[in-house]
């Protein structure tokens, strides 16, 4: 069995949000847009067993759904613009927000999985 690397000064949560390896905070976590790399290219940590599920999508739906719904209501109540203004404003925000949040949130969830699976209480 391989010796586990020493915990780095980078928190797993920060490393996850930055899409970095949760063990060392240096190597890339993803090998594609959303596929987790089998191994860290910096420290060699096995990343293949990290959570690959759809959990981040649920959080994005909840977070972005709240932001867009609240924003649309505020714009409608305060400005009462024609409908096409909503049709122009919100789709790019939904698309950009969804795609922009996916990798950091998936990285964060993978890092949390790594941290709690390993039982690291410090740091
Ligand atoms: Zn690493």
Image (spheres, rainbow, N blue to C red):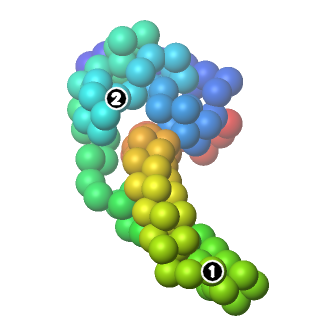
Instruction: Indicate the position of residue 60 as horizontal and vertical percent values.
Output: 45, 62
Q: Nearer the viewer, residue 123 or 79?
A: 79
Judged from the image, the secondary structure of the residue bearing numbered disc 1 is loop
Instruction: Indicate the position of residue 48 as horizontal and vertical percent values.
Output: 24, 32
How many residues crowd around disc 2 within 10 Å: few (fewer than 14), some, or many (20 or more)? many
Instruction: Indicate the position of residue 32 as horizontal and vertical percent values.
Output: 27, 28
Q: Earlier in the sequence, mark 1 or mark 2?
A: 2
Residue 40 in view: yes
* Residue of label 1: 81
Most extreme residue toward the right is: 78
How many residues crowd around disc 1 within 10 Å: few (fewer than 14), some, or many (20 or more)? few
* Residue of label 2: 30
Instruction: Indicate the position of residue 13 as horizontal and vertical percent values.
Output: 58, 42
Q: Quadrant of residue 78?
A: bottom right
Q: What separation in Å lies between label 1 and label 2 (alpha carbons)?
A: 42 Å
Q: Nearer the viewer, residue 30 or 75?
A: 75
Q: What residue is shown at x 42% (from left), y 12% (from top)?
A: 43
Judged from the image, the secondary structure of the residue bearing numbered disc 2 is loop
Q: How many marks?
A: 2
């Amino acid at each position: 069995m391989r010796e586990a690397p020493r915990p780095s000064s980078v928190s797993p949560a920060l490393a996850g949000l930055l899409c970095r390896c949760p063990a060392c905070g240096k190597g890339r976590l993803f090998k594609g847009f959303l596929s987790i790399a089998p191994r860290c290219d910096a420290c060699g940590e096995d990343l293949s067993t990290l959570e690959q599920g759809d959990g981040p999508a649920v959080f994005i739906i909840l977070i972005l759904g709240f932001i867009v719904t609240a924003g649309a209501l505020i714009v409608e109540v305060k400005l009462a613009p024609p409908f096409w203004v909503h049709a122009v404003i919100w789709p790019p925000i939904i698309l950009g927000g969804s795609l922009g949040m996916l990798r950091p949130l998936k990285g964060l969830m993978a890092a949390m999985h790594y941290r709690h699976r390993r039982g690291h209480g410090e740091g």
